[in-house]
Amino acid sequence: MLNRLWQPVNIVGLLRAMSLLFRGRAAAVHADDGHHRLFSAAEWVDFSTRQPPPAAESVRSPCIVLRVPRVLLLNSYDRVPRREIRFSRRNVYLRDAHTCQYCGRVFREEELNLDHVVPRDVGGKTNWENIVTACVRCNSRKANRLPEPAGMTLCRAPARPKWRLVVASSLSPNELEAWKEFLEVTPAGQLPWRN
Ligand SMILES: [Zn+2]
């Protein structure tokens, strides 16, 4: 979702996106030849009919095939986007690109754990600066110790991530293509993709 200033503010699921579009709360944004066209729900239906999307880019009902809108522009949302990213297990994994911060290997989510760099017993906090992604093996090897006594080194110091980077890393390649320019860091107020 983009707010009226064309700043990314949120990611929503398909149902919510369709609901916003069909209730007139948002317009679909489609890039065509470097230009962004805005579509109302009716125009989007028409566009989907005239230019049928590939199967992976569409939703189907018995009587209609609709293109999945990747980017929506909200009609009435002026709030400046929240730059703070919520601290959660999933977002820590995304920040660390599903990479164990001790052995440097990439794992599936179910093979990962959160590790307190400074253990809780000795005052380690549960926050962006003290929590890293660790594989099950490294996590149990480190146990309740600081990295050094455990003979382990962090790939990089944990820090609060940038909202845009986490958003970008959570998108599929197709989605990223549609979002690339909106996630580019531009000086506030400059909207190079408009006009
Ligand atoms: Zn590991």
Image (spheres, helix red, strand yellow):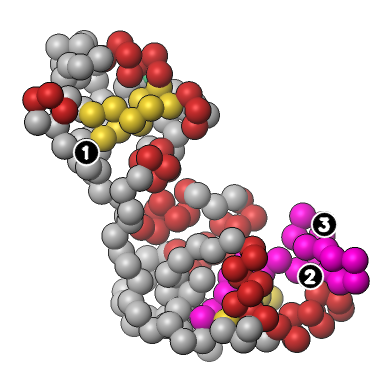
The image position of residue 117, as x and y in percent, is 21, 27
Q: Is mark 2 within 8 Å of ligand 1?
A: no
Label 2 neighbourhood size at 10 Å, few (<14), some (14-19), many (20+)? many
As for residue 26 lying within the magenta part, the answer is no
Q: Is residue 52 visible?
A: no
Q: Examine the rendered structure and indicate whether residue 173 appears above or below residue 125.
A: below
Q: Along the polypeptide, which appears first: circle 3 or circle 2?
A: 3
Report the residue marked by disc 3.
55
The label number, if any, that marks residue 66 in the structure image: 2
Look at discs 1 and 2 and give the one toward the viewer. 1
Q: Which residue is mark 1?
A: 126
* Residue 180: image location, x then y, percent: 52, 62
Say which amino acid is labelled 1.
Answer: Thr
Q: CA distance from mark 3 to mark 2?
A: 10 Å
Whether residue 59 is in magenta: the answer is yes
Image location of residue 50, percent across then percent down: 87, 78
Observer-nearest of 21 and 171: 21
Indicate yes or no: mark 1 CB to ligand 1 under 8 Å: no
Amino acid on which disc 3 is placed: Ala
Q: CA distance from mark 3 to mark 1?
A: 43 Å
Question: Which amino acid type is marked by label 2?
Answer: Leu
Q: Residue at the location (71% across, 66% down)?
A: 68
Q: Sequence-wise, which precedes: disc 3 or disc 1?
A: 3
Secondary structure under the numbered disc 2 in the rendered image: strand
Closer-to-camera residue (2/62): 62
Please give the range of residues in magenta: 52-74
Residue at figure coordinates x 68%, y 86% from the top left: 40
Q: Residue at x 63, y 74 (%)?
A: 19
Q: Is residue 158 visible?
A: yes
User: Quadrant of the rendered structure where residue 138 is?
Assistant: top left
